[in-house]
Structures are given as structure tokens and as C-alpha cells.
Amino acid sequence: MRNKTTYLLSALLLAIAFFACKTTNKSLGSTQDSLLWKIEGKGLSKPSYVLGTIHMLPQKDYFFSDAMKNAFEQSEQVVLELDMDDPQMSMQLLKFATMSDGSTLDKLLSPADYQKLDDLCKKSVGVGIAAFNKWQPMLVYSLILKEFLGEQPASYELSLVQMAQGASKEIKGLESVEDQTKAMSSIPYTKQATYLAEHLKDMESQKALFLKMVDLYKAQDLNGLLKYIEQESGGVDFSTTLLNQRNANWVAPMIASAKAKPTFFAVGAGHLAGDKGVLKLLQKEGYRLTAVR
């Protein structure tokens, strides 16, 4: 059950990242091609590391380099976006998943889109959409991501949780499920439903978009990834809520964790680069960030 919950939460993080592709970020900075960064300076006795992940991807595309392994081994705790080791996570997800204004998917989507979503849910999770009719559209989208990922997708979160448990390293989170669902709900449900419908109408195009993102991720090309996101944005800005504000919220707990003990942070790669990305925000706080390949 724990693994299933971790997969679902990883899918939720990926859905948030995928919706955040509908964003504009004009200031990409000069981030080097690396997913792994060392955090040093400002009184830290030992370095910490931050890894940019893609929350779920096809098994064949998953990798964890020697540099990543070394950074993990040198760290004493693991901090993810969510505490994936929390046994209460599944209950929290169910508690905060519903739309707060009483909206339902059957009213937000056309009958044809609702039927297609029903078919996809039955195929992906074995249950029709009626069971999730009150869930936020972005969260429901996470249920059908197998259409992009294959039957047994890899999850960086699940892998890191298993590695941390095997090494007796503490696992923490930068935010709660409630924080994430509140971030989603700040985007009007009608707008969420509109983009869910767009994804449903052109699944092959969305799959191609996702696989291109995977290719850029494997190349460790953070700037290329953000440029591609900008190129595909269509001028819609979800970044303030889904990326920038969350990045700003994470800086203080990241600093506190790094001061307490050497930490291996792992967050979505889209959170790293740019003027409002985690790397730049940590630099502004006086820390030295060095790319590790």
C-alpha cells in the first residue's frame, strides 16, 4: 500500500510539473548542464546536495549516476518535496483532494471528455471516474499518467525512499499534501478542467511533449528544459503558484535542514533554474552552488 501511495504522490508531483509547462519564464539565467548541485558556504560544516528530478518516467529512461550515489552516501538525511515515508500520506491525500466549492468533474467537463476520462481511469486504476468526481482536475490527471509512462514507471521518490530506508537515513518533506493541494486550488477549477480537457483531446501530442522533456532531462539540460517549457507554454502562466511561490517557501526549510546535518534534497528539475528557482534563491542567501557531474 505504501508503494502505491508513493507512486500516486509521485504522479501528482509530475502532474503539477506537467501543468506548470503552461508557463512563461523569461529569465533562465546561465545554469550549467547538471541535475546535481553542491550547497556550501555560509557556515555549513559539511556540504549538502540538491538533485533535480523528474518525478516519474519510463523504466528504460531512469538513471542514478555515480555522482548522485556519492552525494547521497555523503548525506545524513533525505528531504523531498513531500515526506513520502509518512504513513498518513494516503489519508491526507483523500482528505484534501476534493474541490472546496462543491464542483464536480461531470459539470466541468463535456460529456465526451468525461466519458474519455472514465475510460482512461478504468484502464489505469481499475475504477471509473465517478469515484473521483469531486477531485481537483489536476489531481485526477495524475491517475491517468500511465498513458505516458507505461505499466511500471520508475519513480525517483520511491527509489530515494527505498535507498534512505536501506541506509537508515531520515526522510523529510519541504511541504505537506495540504500545501500542494492548496497551491493547485488557487488555480480556478474551470481552468484546471480546460487544460485537462486539452490533454484528453490530444493524448499523442501530450505524450510527445512529455517524452521530449524526458530527453532533455536525461541530457541534464536544465536551461534547455525550461526553454522548451517556455516554447510550449502558449502564453499561460501557472508558474507563480506551481513553481515560484513554492520555491520561495522551500528556501527556509532547506537552509534549516542543511545547517542541521548534510542533506540530500530532491525536487522537480523545473524548480532549480531561473531567477526565481531554488538555485538562485539559495545563492541570494549567501550559499555557494556548484554543479556536480
Image (cartoon, grey):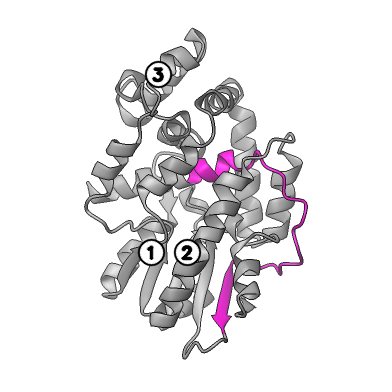
Magenta residues, start to end: 14-40
Quadrant position of the C terminus in the picture: bottom right
Q: In this figure, which residue is indicated by the disc labeled 3? A: 104
Q: Are marks 1 and 2 in contact (CB under 8 Å)?
A: yes
Badge 1: few (under 14), some or many (20 or more) residues near its Cα, within 10 Å? some
Q: Amino acid type of disc 3?
A: Thr
In the figure, 215 relative to 282: above or below?
above
Q: Which mark is residue 256?
A: none
Q: Residue furthest top?
A: 111
Cα gap from disc 1 to disc 3, whole angstroms: 35 Å
Q: Few, some or many C-alpha atoms within 10 Å of disc 3 (few <14, some 14-19, many ≥20)?
A: some
Instruction: Give left or right: position of 178 versus 194.
Output: left
**Label pair 1/3, CB-CB below 8 angstroms:** no
The circle drawn on residue 160 is: 1
Describe residue 52's horizontal placement relative to residue 10 as left or right.
right
- The quadrant holding residue 273 is bottom right
Q: Nearer the viewer, residue 180 or 120?
A: 180
In the image, is 274 to the left or to the right of 122?
right
Residue at 26% in and 56% down: 86
Say which label, 1 or 2, has the lower sequence index.
Answer: 1
Report x, y in % for residue 187. 54, 34
Measured as percent of width and height from the top left, residue 103 is found at: 41, 20
Q: Nearer the viewer, mark 2 or mark 3?
A: 3
In the image, what residue occupies the spot 46% across and 51% down? 59
Secondary structure beneath label 1: helix
Q: CA distance from mark 2 to mark 3?
A: 34 Å
Counting residues from the start of the chain, the first of labels 2 and 3 encountered is 3
Amino acid type assigned to the residue bearing label 2 in the image: Ala
* Pair 1/3: label in front: 3
Which labelled disc corresponds to residue 266?
Answer: 2
Please indicate, yes or no, whether residue 268 appears anywhere in the rendered image. no
The amino acid type, in three-letter code, at marker 1 is: Leu
